[in-house]
């Protein structure tokens, strides 16, 4: 098993589930590798379901029916949201106001994970290790 833990962000997770061609070659390699430790955040379930319920992800009904099954095909492990994650997310010295980005960044920092993300704001946040 690989030594680097990876935390897949919500957009990359959605890409992996419904349109893997949208992933970068590096992200595809990590996601398809059985040698890596790959996690999805519980926060991604909330973010994606929230956006779907608000009509921002039309036509993705199938993703939310059996969501956990679909996620486990991409990332077999889940990082739950803890109080430490939430408190750290709120206190990050980062001008990104997206609460989901902040929470996933906090989880990655605390858990020592590299974030798989195409989000430039996350990739530019220096304390965070990212891959795309």
Image (cartoon, rainbow, N blue to C red):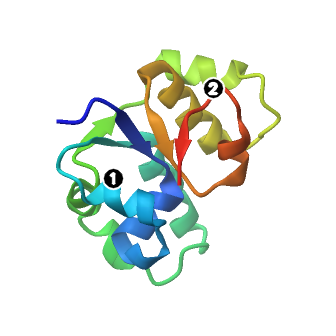
Q: Residue furthest bottom?
A: 59
Image location of residue 116, percent across then percent down: 48, 49
Residue 100 quadrant: top right
Q: Residue 12 versus residue 49: which sits nearer the camera?
A: 12
Image location of residue 89, percent across then percent down: 63, 26
- Categorize mark 2 by other alpha carbons within 10 Å: few (<14), some (14-19), many (20+): many
Residue at x 49% of width, y 74% of height: 22
**Callout 2: helix, strand or loop?**
helix
Question: In the figure, 25 relative to 112: above or below?
Answer: below
Q: Is residue 55 left or right of residue 3?
A: right
Task: Give me the disc on residue 89.
Answer: 2
Image location of residue 24, percent across then percent down: 48, 66
Question: In the figure, 52 relative to 92: above or below?
Answer: below
Q: CA distance from mark 2 to mark 1?
A: 26 Å
Precedes in sequence: disc 2 or disc 1: 1
Q: Nearer the viewer, mark 2 or mark 1?
A: 1
Image location of residue 129, percent across then percent down: 55, 34
**Callout 1: helix, strand or loop?**
helix
- Categorize mark 1 by other alpha carbons within 10 Å: few (<14), some (14-19), many (20+): some
Q: Is residue 113 left or right of residue 131?
A: left
Residue pointed to by mark 1: 30
Question: In the figure, 50 relative to 2: above or below?
Answer: below
Residue at x 83% of width, y 35% of height: 95
Task: Give me the disc on residue 47.
Answer: none
Contact between labelled residues 1 and 2, with CB atoms less than 8 Å apart = no
Question: In the figure, 115 relative to 19: above or below?
Answer: above
């Amino acid at each position: 098993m690989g030594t680097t833990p990876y935390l897949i962000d919500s957009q990359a997770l959605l890409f992996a589930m419904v349109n893997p061609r949208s992933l970068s070659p590096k992200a595809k390699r990590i996601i398809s590798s059985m040698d890596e430790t790959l996690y999805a955040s519980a926060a991604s379930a909330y973010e994606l379901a929230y956006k779907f319920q608000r009509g921002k992800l039309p036509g993705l009904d199938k993703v939310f029916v059996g969501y956990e099954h679909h996620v486990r095909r991409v990332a077999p492990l889940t990082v739950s949201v803890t109080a430490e994650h939430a408190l750290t997310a709120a206190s990050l010295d980062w001008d990104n106001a997206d609460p989901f980005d902040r929470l996933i960044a906090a989880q990655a920092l605390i858990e020592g994970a590299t974030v798989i993300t195409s989000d430039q704001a996350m990739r530019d946040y220096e304390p965070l290790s990212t891959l795309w």
